[in-house]
Amino acid sequence: MQRTLIKDANARTEPLDAILLQGWVRTRRDAKAFSFIELNDGSTLKGIQVVADATLPDYAHIQKAHTGASIEVRGKLVPSQGQGQKWEVVAASFTILGEADATYPLQKKGHTLEFLREIAHLRPRSNLFGAVFRVRSRLAFAVHQFFQAKHFCYVHTPIVTASDAEGAGDMFRVTTLDVGKPPRDEHGEVDSTKDFFGKKTFLTVSGQLEAEIFATALSNVYTFGPTFRAENSNTSRHAAEFWMIEPEMAFCDLYGDMELAEEFVKYLIRDAKEHCAADLEFFSKFVDKELMARLDFVLDKKFVRCSYTEAVEILTQSGKAWEHPVAWGSNLQAEHERFLTEEHFKCPVTLYNYPRAIKAFYMRKTDGCAPDRQTVAAMDLLVPGIGEIIGGSQREERLTELREGMALHHLDEKAYWWYLDLRRYGTVPHAGFGLGFERMLMFVTGVSNIRDVIPFARTPGTADF
Ligand code: 4AD
Ligand code: MG
């Protein structure tokens, strides 16, 4: 007999004479003549009630079906007598597949998120994490649907790379050399020519540069994969390993880039509302009461667009005492970004045209700027509660200006020879962005720590499981 998922059992319109369920016991309550088991198999938030009559031949086993045990139940699906559920299963036979004793850490009482992080091997069995990871799965699928429907080509960019895509240097080194006794060259430096790849290699910080190669051949492409940052930022929004979606479009400017970013974010929210309604309802009950109102608000609103220069004026005139002072040319900090989106505009905001000196080397230099106010066609999308969720730009397609940007950022042209070639042969205006998948999940679920929307968080000092 085929197993029925509890999601499908709950959704049935007709009873069933024979059903097979498999799952884990959430709770068991024994009455005189019956036991009631709440069974969950992770297919949906809401478990199903199994009723086991004390006259069952297997009834003695049921006493061993403690919270956390895995069981198999055969029986009938019948309308429930109890409150709060349409169906229940009257057991005919019952098998314990794997016992769990009283040391099982996920007992009924509520646990703190910090404690659940320490048991990341068991937390997917809780309501909250089951819901988070179902939404994560659904939205990963929706990412592909969104781009495939627009005929974007999915490109697998490398995870091990020799180039620093952001030119910022916070990369994890990949090596097979004996770190205690590495081979050295005549200057006493570690000899990377003896390393596995014959050169220094790293985990990628972004697939953008390789995506640009494909965009200048296939026009519209995207990557979706893990990226790595060795930044020592211990915040609730930074992980050392996170997933990023990076579309790249040839024949596109910053405006087209911002349009796509806004459409994409709204699409993902709409998809989650449509396909993960029960899970979102759970988040809005237990995680963030404002969640649904915020998501609806974001769907309805056209996002505000504001230049960096205007943003600096707003911030300096706000009368706020900033921890990090603001002046034209300085990087905006989380406190500034949150003020703009949460207090000033009260709406998602796309900031654009940032000072050239604080942005990456590949961003397109804005024409006609005053020399002391040189900007690039960069954009960051900020959302309430999180701040930056997307970073993107129009890329510098002009060889001379790109080389100038590289010199400004002290980058070695030799390392980027192939990137420069894209400007030598058939260059085109092009643009793209990166959406942090975990930040998007935080926004959609209301979960406030990035460690709780990724199955196994890698943050400074932590790489368990
Ligand atoms: O702004 P970032 O650094 O941009 C890039 O990497 C570009 N190459 C993207 C592109 O244009 N193709 O990162 C993009 C997004 C951020 O807006 C943020 O959502 C997320 O990636 N992000 C992180 N998420 C979690 N932990 C971190 N340490 C993150 N760093 C960036
Ligand atoms: Mg950024």
Image (tube, helix red, strand yellow):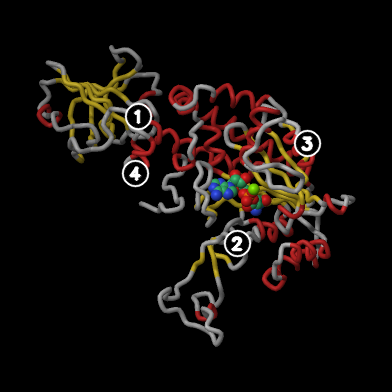
Question: How many C-alpha atoms fall within 10 Å of the one at disc 1: few (<14), some, or many (≥20)?
Answer: many
Residue at x 36%, y 19% (from the top left corner): 14
Which one is closest to the eye, mark 2 or mark 3?
3
Image coords of residue 391 (percent x, y): 66, 46
Q: Is residue 210 visible?
A: no
Query: Which residue position holds label 3?
Result: 313
Query: In front here: 333 or 224?
Result: 333
Residue at x 25%, y 27% (from the top left corner): 27
Of labels 1 and 2, earlier in sequence is 1
Q: Give the residue type at disc 2.
A: Gly
Residue at x 64%, y 24% (from the top left corner): 297
Of labels 2 and 4, earlier in sequence is 4
Of labels 3 and 4, earlier in sequence is 4
Query: Which residue position holds label 2?
Result: 169
In the rendered view, tell whether residue 317 sits above or below residue 234: above
| Position of the N terminus by quadrant | top left
Q: Give the residue type at disc 1.
A: Ile
Query: Which residue position holds label 1?
Result: 6
Which one is closest to the eye, mark 3 or mark 4?
3
